[in-house]
Amino acid sequence: MDDDFEYHLKLPSSPYSDASKHSKADLNTTSTDCIKEPVVILLGWMGCNYKHLSKYSEFYEAKGCVTISYIAATSTILFSRAKAKEHAQKILQLLIDFSYEDNPIFFHLFSNGGSIIYHHISSLLGNASEFKHLKVCGSVFDSAPGKPRPINAIKSILIVFQHWNIIFRLFAALFLFIYLHFTVIKHKILNYFMGPDHGDVYSFLKNDSGYLMPQLYLYSSVDKIIMSDDIEQMIKFREESLGVKIFKHKWTDSSHVKHFVSHRETYINTCYSFLDTCLKEFIQKSESSKF
């Protein structure tokens, strides 16, 4: 295993439980008792650390989920598409290595940093035969995805390196602004001639039809890094053109990747409800396929 491939795997403290078990009014709800514990893969944003992600993994573990947390290095996100794809493949391989092939799997990704890794994961799930059997049930998008805008990437970089010397930060920002402009142009050309698989991440995720599992979008109208219009265009296209089952929650006061901090209870309950809904559908499909 590469020295720069780091992940954190944590086991739940109790079996998976859904809200319907405690509701007398919902007697016909499919129980999730019969399934193996869900596995939630958390893909961090650029500049976050495992202490940040642990706040999210903790509430999934309390629900009864196994969590695998991964954060791509800034250099991988910005400059190494090959390394990002390699690490995406290793994340999926972990599911096989730890014998989670028959467990329901969820992804929870943050910002465009997490989207870059997720787009390679999604491509592998749709095209690599060794991963097609994995039981992916749904994906959660927090503050993502956004269209490729160099100025927004620069804002992220300045936040990530806010403790660095101001002169160095400005030179780095100028270099990245030029580099990212060329990258955007290159992706537009590739997207036009070779299709979304070879273009930018946003175009791929918008058009991705490799597997059409339910998706939950958590976003805000005041996010200055990822525009809410980008997310809503994504939602509209995938729902209307591809038939993807979409869930969403839009806030009007929380900033980029700060929705959990600003709205902890609503955030957790929304994620829990999404998991319960997806797992019940997963069980129903599994049971119907037996006949």
Image (tube, rainbow, N blue to C red):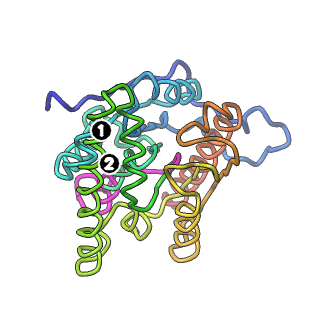
For the point 27% across and 68% down, which residue is it? 187
Residue 138: x and y, percent?
50, 51
Inter-mark Cα distance, 1 to 2? 8 Å
Position above or below: 38 against 244: above
Relative side of 283 to 105, left or right = right
58 in the magenta segment: no
Position above or below: 35 against 193: above
Q: Within the image, what quadrant is residue 120 found in?
A: bottom left
- Where are the magenta residues, as a range? 120-143
- Circles 1 and 2 in contact, beta carbons < 8 Å: yes
| Residue nearest the viewer, comparing 191 with 32 | 191
At label 1, the amino acid type is Ala
The earlier-in-sequence mark between 1 and 2 is 1
Q: Residue furthest right?
A: 25
Q: Within the image, what quadrant is residue 255 found in?
A: top right
Residue 159: x and y, percent?
42, 36
132 in the magenta segment: yes
Position above or below: 17 against 135: above
Mark 2 element type: helix
The residue identified by callout 1 is 72
Q: Mark 2, residues whose alpha carbon is within 10 Å: few (<14), some, or many (≥20)?
A: many
Q: Which mark is residue 197?
A: none
Relative side of 165 to 226, left or right = left
The residue identified by callout 2 is 117
At label 2, the amino acid type is Ile
